[in-house]
Image (cartoon, coloured by chain):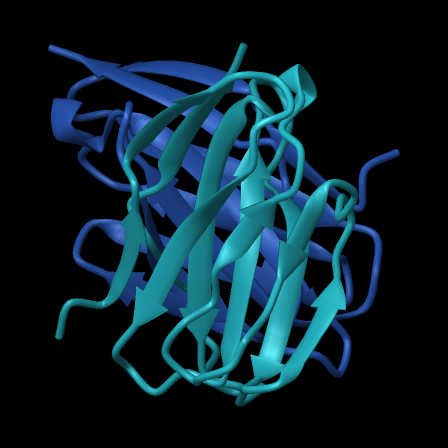
Chain colours: A blue, B cyan
Amino acid sequence: KNEVEQSPQNLTAQEGEFITINCSYSVGISALHWLQQHPGGGIVSLFMLSSGKKKHGRLIATINIQEKHSSLHITASHPRDSAVYICAVNGYGTASKLTFGTGTRLQVTL
Amino acid sequence: NAGVTQTPKFQVLKTGQSMTLQCAQDMNHEYMSWYRQDPGMGLRLIHYSVGAGITDQGEVPNGYNVSRSTTEDFPLRLLSAAPSQTSVYFCASSHSWLWDNEQFFGPGTRLTVL
């Protein structure tokens, strides 16, 4: 079993829909990261969080440390949100190494 | 700031050839890492460095060498390329602080080994 599991693996939504991507992990962590990768493109950091909730524009990330679970929400989805969303964690007490989930491929159609 | 830069963007090698993937960052980050990304798998850590002169192995280090002589540069060397090393390689850097280690990734190098 992978240390970081994401669901769903693939997601198709219509423009305007509210989207949720889930991430569960099995180890103690210092922080959890949400990353975005566009097709053929590089990887950018969306959020880093160790507790609570963060919001940036239409994106919201939450984490529940006790349940070892995080969610990434996209409100009012748009075709430009189509990308792979990756969850990654820093093991407890370390900022130097990340363990990654396999990603959620999101396609938003008109 | 240029952020994290990687060269080359694309490379084709023959089995047995050696080469170096370059990575540089201009943000004075302590931590630098190399990952490979293969279809259907998450990014996997090859080697990482917590500062100049200090490197360590990650999850999949075999066939790769690294060195960190300066804070800015972290090259990845393929000693004798094999088809199994066909992959997309990403370099990343961050500060060392537990409360703020936002990851910055390079654009990637797509490597094909024939």
Instruction: Please state the total of marks drawn on the protein image.
Output: 0
Q: Does residue A18 appear left or right of residue A10 in this picture?
A: left
Q: Could you tell me if residue B46 is visible in this image?
A: yes
Q: Position of residue B79 (x, y in %)?
A: 65, 42
Question: Which residue occupies 57% across, 75% down?
Answer: A51
**Compared to B3, does A7 lie above or below?**
above
Q: Residue furthest right?
A: A1
Q: Residue furthest front?
A: B17
Identify which residue, B82 or A55, lies in the foreground: B82
Identify which residue, B44 or B80, lies in the foreground: B80
Q: Please state, as top left, top right, bottom left or bottom right, where the C terminus of chain B lies in the image.
A: top right
Q: Does residue B59 appear left or right of residue B33 in this picture?
A: right
Q: Position of residue B82 (x, y in %)?
A: 67, 22
Q: Position of residue B29 (x, y in %)?
A: 41, 83
Question: Which residue occupies 56% across, 18% down?
Answer: B39
Q: Does residue B7 appear left or right of residue B57 in this picture?
A: left
Q: Could you tell me if residue A98 is visible in this image?
A: no
Which quadrant holds residue B71?
bottom left
Question: Which residue occupies 29% across, 45% down?
Answer: B107
Identify which residue, B20 or A100, lies in the foreground: B20
**Compared to B69, does B66 lie above or below?**
above
Q: Position of residue A6 (x, y in %)?
A: 62, 34
Which quadrant holds residue B25?
bottom left
Q: Does residue A22 appear left or right of residue B59 in this picture?
A: left
**Compared to A63, does A58 lie above or below?**
above
